[in-house]
Image: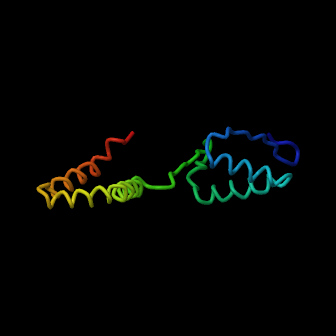
Amino acid sequence: MITSDKYRFTLQWNTATAEKVQVGDFLENLGNKKSEIIVLAVAEYILAHPDSLPPGKSPQLIIKPSYTREQLEVLVKTIIEEKLSGTQFIARENAGSGGDITAIEADIDEMLNNLDMFEK
C-alpha cells in the first residue's frame, strides 16, 4: 500500500523449507532495517530479469531452478555410480567365477539411462 511518502507492506510465509527459515531468520535479525534489504533484493531481481516487468501489464515472477535438468541428471548418475562402486567391485570378483561383468554393467547403464521415468 502506498501512503503520502512511503510504501507499507506486510509479508508472511510458512517455514516449509530450509530456505524460507533461513530468510526468515535473516530478516528477523535485521530488526527495523528489513526494508533496505528487501528493496535491494527486489531491485537486483528486476535488473536480472528485465522481462518480469512487461510494459502495461502486471509483473511476472520468473523462477529458475538452481540446477538445469542436465546438471541434475549428471548429479544423480554420479551419486548412483558412487553408491554402486562397491557393488561393481563385488560384481567384478564374481565375473572371474563365471559371472558376466559386461551384462551387469549394461544393466547398470540401462538403469542410469532410464532416469527420465522420474520426469514430471
Image color mode: rainbow
Q: Please, which residue is most extreme toward the left here?
A: 98
Foreground: 68 or 3?
A: 68
Query: In this picture, is 12 found above or below 68?
Result: above
Residue 15 lies in quadrant: top right
Q: Please, which residue is most extreme toward the right here?
A: 4
Indicate left or right for 36 with 54 as reference. right
Identify the residue shown where x is 84% and y is 52%: 31
How many numbered tags mark residues here? 0
Indicate left or right for 55 with 8 as reference. left
Query: In this picture, is 43 found above or below 58?
Result: below
Q: Position of residue 25 (x, y in %)?
A: 74, 50
Q: Position of residue 98 (x, y in %)?
A: 11, 56
Foreground: 12 or 92?
A: 92
Identify the residue shown where x is 58% and y is 46%: 61
Foreground: 56 or 1?
A: 1
Indicate left or right for 68 with 109 as reference. right
Which image quarter holds the N terminus?
Answer: top right
Which image quarter holds the C terminus?
Answer: top left
Identify the residue shown where x is 24% and y is 54%: 109
Q: Position of residue 9 (x, y in %)?
A: 78, 42
Foreground: 104 or 57?
A: 104
Q: Position of residue 21 (x, y in %)?
A: 68, 46
Indicate left or right for 97 with 59 as reference. left
